[in-house]
Image (spheres, rainbow, N blue to C red):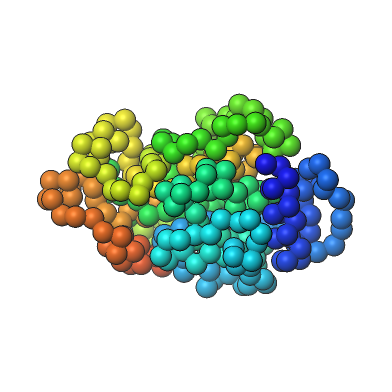
Amino acid sequence: MSERIRNTTCFIRSRLNIAPHRYYTDMPGGAVETGGLPAPQVGIVLGSGLGALADSIETIGTLDYAEIPDFPRSTVPGHRGRFIYGRLGGKYVIAMEGRVHYYEGYPIRDVVLPVRVLCCLGIETLIVSNAAGGLTPLFQVGDIMVIEDHINLIPNPLVGPNDAVLGERFSDMTQPYDRKLIALAHRVAREQGFSLQQGCYVGTTGPSYETPAEVRYFHTIGGDAIGMSTTPEVIVARHQGVSVLGFSLITNALRRSETSGSPLTHAEVVEASGEATPRLCALVSEVVARL
C-alpha cells in the first residue's frame, strides 16, 4: 500500500509542482528532491455544502482524478472529481472537489487513498464536510453541526498490514476532532452572526436511507447526525497525525420524517445544502485564515 500512496503522491506533486514533504522522502524509494511550490498547510474535502468554496480559492493548479493513474473516481452527482491547489485566507491549501464513498463499490483502501495522499503532501490540518440527516429533534434543516466525535459503522481503513511510516499500529482516537479548532469554529460563527450546533456524527455505509427503527437506534447510541462518508477519512488523517475539523450540514430532519412518512430524496438533500452553502463557505474561509 505504501508504494501506491508514494506513487500517487509523487504524480500529484509533480503535476501541481508541489515541493516534497517528509512523508514522501521517508517512504522506501522516495528520493530526496528540492524545488517546487510550498506544500499545502490545509486539506479540505469539499463534500455536500462546501462545493462552492472552490470559487473562493485563489487557484494555482488543478488536477482531475481521471488523469491520475489507478485513482478512484467519484460517481455521485455534484462531486466533480478534481484536486484544487491554491491559496485561501493567506494559506496554501489543497481541496478535494468531490470524494468517493464506500457505497460506490470501492474497497475501503481506495475510499481513503485521496486523504492519505493529502497527508503525504504535507497538510497539517484537514477540514471535512458532509451532508447529514439530523437525529436530534432540535436540529433544523439548514443547521451546521461542528463534529465533536463520531461513531464509525463503515469498515475501518486501518485493518490489514500497518505501514509504520504513516502511523502506529493502534491509532489513538480519543480526540478525533481537534478541540481548539472546534472552539475557533464556534467563535468565528458567532462573529458572523449565527450559531453552530455541535454533536456526534454517525458514519454508515449507505446508500439506502435509514429506516425509522434505525433512526431511533442511532440516536439512542449517541448519534446526533448521520451520513455515508467522512469517518474513514478522519481515521486515516489521525493515523498520520493530522488535526481534523469537521462539519455536517443538516439537510433533513430524520426524527421528524420518521413520523410524517415523507420519503427522502437525494434532490432534497442537494437543495437543502445549497441554501446553507454560503454560511458554511464563509465560516471555513475565515477559520482557515486564522489557523
**Residue placed furthest toward the top:** 170
- Image position of 101 with respect to 97: above or below: above
**Residue 158 lies in what quarter of the image?**
top right
Q: Nearer the viewer, residue 171 or 109?
A: 109
Q: Position of residue 90 (x, y in %)?
A: 65, 65
Q: Answer with left or right where residue 22 lies relative to residue 140.
A: right
Q: Image check: 237 left or right of 258?
A: right
Q: Residue at x 46, y 49 (%)?
A: 105
Looking at the image, is 91 positioned above or below residue 166? below
Picture quadrant where residue 66 is located: bottom right
Q: Is residue 184 visible?
A: no
Where is the N terminus found, in terms of image quarters?
top right
Q: Position of residue 192 (x, y in %)?
A: 42, 62
Please tell me which residue lies in front, 120 or 50: 120
Question: Can see residue 151?
Answer: yes
Q: Is residue 64 left or right of residue 249?
A: right
Residue at image coords 79%, 59%: 19
127 or 25, which lies in front?
25
In the picture, measured across the screen, residue 217 lies left or right of residue 159, that is left
User: Image point 69% across, 38% down: which residue?
Assistant: 166
Residue drawn at x 36%, y 67% as measured from the top left = 274
Residue 30 horizontal/vertical position (percent): 82, 48
Looking at the image, residue 143 lies above or below residue 213: below
